[in-house]
Image: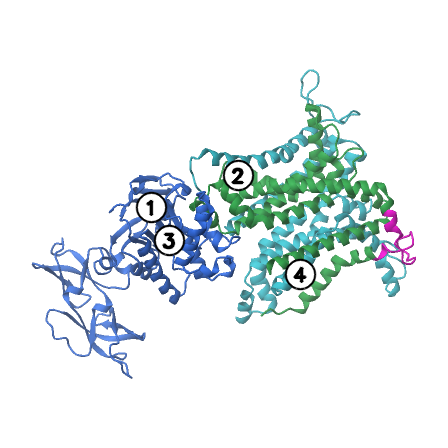
Chain colours: A blue, B green, C cyan
């Protein structure tokens, strides 16, 4: 169902402050959807409206065809995993997980059976009698997850699920979450400020800023085809070159770019006019760097000097200084194993990229 | 990093000595055989014996205990409600007044609180005939009123430092707000409520001024009895009584400390 | 828990939770002040109760400001109010001088020692206040322990008059209210990052400079709270001046008590209470403001 979750015209005002500004969103059943944005962008408010802890000032929210906009949190087929996990400190792991089912007044045998199933799913079977203060952060998170999922909600909301975990645990948990979601088929809505998290976990991402959605799409769409400078900059790093449209060809645009010192080509049709100010954006990993002048005429080719470099083991990152002082970020995989570095400070280099690698951004 | 300057340590030592030395002497002199408290007449426990034969003291003690128990319990219930309201109910009409009324009894000079409550009871009697006899009920009401302030502050402070998502999580899982209070909130603030009860109990047991104002003939609390004797000067049977109270409190605190240690492990 | 749902039963419980303590306080705390005001405007009579009613037979208002006029013009009362302010202030300063280093020392102690130290500060508080004041009577008596000790040490020849002096009242007040100063101070100092002092010293500040520049400003909220928690009740203190003070060291709490119990002049006692309240309004409001700020900081 394409609009399993249907958000229409939802706004939330706190006095004069507009936290969420008239947003629309459709989330399909079984998706792992992320709302990505910096702090204060409104994503948490939107999540709380989905959960029922805030009531929209305007708009409706429907889940599986049912209007839940004004339903209390305890009546909704929605469950939430809180950022602090909110595991009840005075109850054991098993009692925590059983809590939601007890509120449904199910028979004890049934509850115990399902609790056991859940414990197995999150691999905490041996911990059923433990109290939360005897668990690690990651274990507490699994308790929170089990506790929410046992009620078989239609939608599971996750508030910054990976924020409190260290890097290794984060990677493991990411895949565990994706597996569980796959197994159970529950629709996940994740709220996060971490773009890596969003990119890894999600089927689709909505980038949110100042209460509005800037772009909604798959991780690939957002990364390779950002719709604005903000989105392009927010996800990963990107190099931008400002310029004016010089020529409109059949399936490409040529931009006169003073910053680059040369004309740049970008593929694709765009609704622009000659003379219009636009910017061309290229991701660092799409740029080649080397001491020899690149052969391909089609490619953008610019000369520069290595201003700074960083060795990251698997990657090397370079900051190349162009003639007019502009710094371009280039990253390349260290595909060859060598005892010396490929480039050094102040080396004179050529940077180049394929026309297809550039994106035109209008703002 | 935790350097202890000599100045601070000596002040600490002096401070604690200041707090405890008077009590030490009271205990010592309670075993003084001489009736004149300032001259040592030999070791004796006769004052303790006399204490237990003194009906006045026993009646006063019993009355004080009953009042303390009752007022502490009611104060804990009311104070917990007030603490919940202040910590969880956000803004509502009349909140500033509520908050002010909750905290004021803690600092108000006792003569003012005592006088005001007595005048209230007198006026009520003029208008409605109740309370006819001032004593247990009026003192209990008075003690409840100032004790609930302390309980409210303790409970509120505990609630504010508690993760609010716990209650939201319970609601998210299907608990109605009322159920959530019993399932989650109360169990977690139980230690604060107990501490509040103990504090209210102590304050009630200790109060002299307010009880003097709102009590009636025939209802003398323990502090009132002690005061009437102490006005006349130092006396060894009061020393004995004081020692018993010191012992009881110390014992209670020791038990509580051990219990808390056990709970933690 | 800002859930604005329309479920009537839950709303009802919310209203009950607010209403019950609210009503209790309105009746047993707030209303009495109005009654004090009313009675302060009456006259004493030999009757039960011993003051004139507000309205007489002909439903005419029988209020008079005689009591207040008396208070404001009689020198004795003005001096007593002033003396109460001075004594309460001195006691507050004494508590601060002794309590601040103690609170600081406790805050810097290791966690386990800290709890023990705090317990020892609070423990006397749990032993009857009256009995602790009584303990000082025994110590400061002309033939009490302090005098005996000093004579035995040869410091003095005749016992010095310690009891029934202003000095005795200061000691008594400081003794009783010290925990009220230490606890809020400790709470503020404990929250403070003591690394700041080290950072200042690392940058070249001497110990005293570091204290005045870093510790004192950060501790100020606790200092203010502690001072108010001592000053306000100390102003109206009755027991300590009565038992430890002389007949010339009158404090306003004692005046109120005597007017009420000895002279049976309820209206005048009420007027004394009202004026005392007016004097305390500013400190009490300051304290409320401080506690409100504290609440916000904690959330």
Q: Chain of mark 3?
A: A
User: Does the residue at mark 1 contact the one at mark 4 (Cβ under 8 Å)?
Assistant: no
Q: Residue furthest front?
A: A109
Residue A321: x, y in percent?
Answer: 24, 72
Residue B30: x, y in percent?
Answer: 85, 54
Is disc 4 placed on a helix, strand or loop? helix
CA distance for labels 1 and 3: 18 Å
Q: Is residue B235 visible?
A: no
**Tally of numbered discs:** 4
Residue that carries the numbered disc 4 in the rendered image:
C116
**In the figure, is residue C268 to the left or right of A199?**
right
User: Does the residue at mark 3 contact the one at mark 2 (Cβ under 8 Å)?
Assistant: no
Residue A219: x, y in percent?
Answer: 25, 58
Q: Residues within 10 Å of mark 2 (few under 14, many from 20)?
A: some
Q: Nearer the viewer, mark 2 or mark 4?
A: 4
Residue at x 41%, y 55% (from the top left corner)? A118
Observer-nearest of C8 and C112: C8
CA distance for labels 2 and 4: 37 Å
**In the figure, is residue A17 to the left or right of C1?**
left
Is disc 2 placed on a helix, strand or loop? helix
CA distance for labels 2 and 1: 29 Å
Q: Residue furthest bottom?
A: A339
Q: Residues within 10 Å of mark 3 (few under 14, many from 20)?
A: many
Q: Chain of mark 1?
A: A
CA distance for labels 3 and 4: 43 Å
Residue C30 lies in quadrant: top right
Residue that carries the numbered disc 1 in the rendered image:
A20
Q: Chain of mark 4?
A: C
Residue that carries the numbered disc 3 in the rendered image:
A158
**In the figure, is residue B48 to the left or right of C286?**
right
């Amino acid at each position: 169902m394409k609009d399993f979750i249907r958000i229409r015209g939802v706004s939330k005002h706190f006095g004069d402050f507009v936290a969420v500004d008239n947003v629309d969103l459709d989330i399909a059943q079984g998706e792992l959807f992320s709302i990505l944005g910096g702090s204060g962008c409104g994503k948490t408010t939107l999540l709380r409206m989905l959960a029922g802890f805030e009531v929209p000032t305007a708009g409706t929210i429907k889940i599986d065809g049912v209007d839940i906009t004004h339903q209390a949190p305890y009546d909704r087929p929605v469950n939430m995993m809180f950022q602090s996990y909110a595991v009840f400190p005075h109850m054991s792991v098993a009692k925590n997980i059983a809590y939601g089912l007890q509120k449904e007044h199910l028979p004890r045998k049934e509850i115990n059976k399902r609790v056991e199933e859940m414990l197995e799913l999150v691999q905490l079977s041996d911990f059923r009698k433990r109290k939360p203060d005897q668990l690690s952060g990651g274990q507490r998170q699994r308790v929170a997850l089990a506790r929410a999922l046992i009620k078989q909600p239609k939608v599971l909301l996750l508030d910054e699920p990976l924020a409190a975990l260290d890097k290794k645990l984060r990677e493991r948990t990411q895949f565990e979450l994706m597996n569980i979601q796959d197994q159970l088929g529950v629709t996940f809505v994740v709220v996060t400020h971490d773009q890596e998290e969003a990119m890894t976990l999600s089927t689709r991402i909505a980038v949110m800023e100042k209460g509005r959605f800037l772009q909604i799409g798959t991780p690939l769409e957002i990364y390779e085809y950002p719709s604005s400078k903000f989105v392009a900059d927010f996800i990963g790093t990107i190099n931008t070159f400002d310029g004016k449209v010089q020529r409109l060809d059949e399936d490409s645009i040529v931009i006169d770019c003073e910053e680059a010192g040369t004309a740049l080509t970008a593929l694709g049709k765009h609704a622009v006019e000659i003379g219009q100010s636009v910017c061309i954006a290229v991701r660092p990993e799409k740029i080649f760097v080397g001491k020899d002048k690149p052969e391909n005429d089609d490619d953008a080719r610019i000369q520069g000097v290595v201003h700074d470099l960083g060795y990251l083991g698997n990657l090397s990152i370079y900051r190349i200084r162009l003639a007019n002082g502009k710094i371009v970020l280039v990253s390349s995989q260290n595909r060859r194993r060598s005892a010396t570095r490929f480039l050094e400070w102040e080396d004179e280099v050529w940077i180049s990229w394929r026309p297809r690698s550039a994106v035109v951004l209008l703002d | 990093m935790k350097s202890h300057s000599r100045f601070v340590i000596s002040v600490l030592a002096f401070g604690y000595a200041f707090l405890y030395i008077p009590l030490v002497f009271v205990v010592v002199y309670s075993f003084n055989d001489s009736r004149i408290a300032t001259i040592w007449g030999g070791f004796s426990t006769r004052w303790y014996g006399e204490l237990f034969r003194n009906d006045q003291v026993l009646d006063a003690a019993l009355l004080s205990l009953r009042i303390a128990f009752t007022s502490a319990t009611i104060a804990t219930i009311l104070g917990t409600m007030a603490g919940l309201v202040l910590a969880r109910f956000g803004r509502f009409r009349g909140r500033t007044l509520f908050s002010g009324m909750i905290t004021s009894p803690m600092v108000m000079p006792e003569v003012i609180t005592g006088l005001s409550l007595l005048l209230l009871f007198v006026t009520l009697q003029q208008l409605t005939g109740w309370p006819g006899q001032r004593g247990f009920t009026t003192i209990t009401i008075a003690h409840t009123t100032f004790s609930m302030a302390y309980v409210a502050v303790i409970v509120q402070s505990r609630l504010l430092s508690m993760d609010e998502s716990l209650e939201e999580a319970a609601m998210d899982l299907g608990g109605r707000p009322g159920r959530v209070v019993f399932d989650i909130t109360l169990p977690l603030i139980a230690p604060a409520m107990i501490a509040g009860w103990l504090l209210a109990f102590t304050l009630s047991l200790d109060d002299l001024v307010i009880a003097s104002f709102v009590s009636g003939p025939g209802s003398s609390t323990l502090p009132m009895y002690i005061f009437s004797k102490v006005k006349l000067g130092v006396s060894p049977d009061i020393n004995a009584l004081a020692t018993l109270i010191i012992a009881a409190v110390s014992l209670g605190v020791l038990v509580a400390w051990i219990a808390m240690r056990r709970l933690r492990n | 828990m800002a859930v604005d749902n329309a479920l009537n039963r839950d709303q009802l419980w919310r209203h009950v939770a607010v209403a019950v303590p609210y009503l209790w306080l309105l009746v047993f705390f707030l209303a009495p002040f109005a009654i004090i005001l009313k009675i302060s405007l009456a006259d004493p009579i030999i009757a039960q109760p011993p003051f004139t009613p507000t309205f007489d037979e002909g439903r005419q208002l029988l209020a008079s400001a005689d009591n207040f006029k008396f208070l404001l013009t009689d020198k004795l009362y003005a001096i007593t109010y002033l003396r109460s302010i001075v004594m309460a202030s001195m006691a507050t300063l004494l508590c601060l001088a002794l309590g601040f280093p103690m609170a600081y020392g406790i805050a810097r102690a290791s966690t386990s020692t800290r709890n023990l130290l705090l317990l020892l500060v609070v423990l006397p508080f749990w032993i009857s206040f009256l009995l602790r004041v009584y303990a000082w009577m025994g110590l400061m008596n002309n033939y009490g322990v302090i005098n005996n000790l000093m004579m035995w040490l040869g410091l003095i020849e005749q016992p010095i008059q310690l009891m029934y002096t202003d000095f005795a009242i200061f000691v008594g007040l400081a003794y009783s209210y010290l925990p009220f100063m230490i606890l809020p101070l400790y709470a503020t100092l404990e929250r403070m990052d003591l690394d700041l002092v080290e950072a200042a010293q690392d940058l070249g500040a001497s110990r005293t400079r570091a204290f005045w520049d870093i510790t004192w400003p950060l501790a100020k909220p606790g200092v203010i709270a502690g001072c108010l928690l001592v000053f306000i009740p100390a102003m109206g203190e009755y027991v300590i001046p009565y038992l430890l003070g002389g007949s010339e060291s009158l404090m306003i709490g004692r005046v109120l008590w005597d007017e009420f119990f000895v002279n049976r002049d309820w209206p005048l006692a009420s007027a004394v209470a009202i004026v005392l309240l007016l004097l305390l309004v500013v400190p009490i409001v300051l304290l409320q403001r401080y506690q409100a700020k504290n609440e916000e900081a904690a959330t």
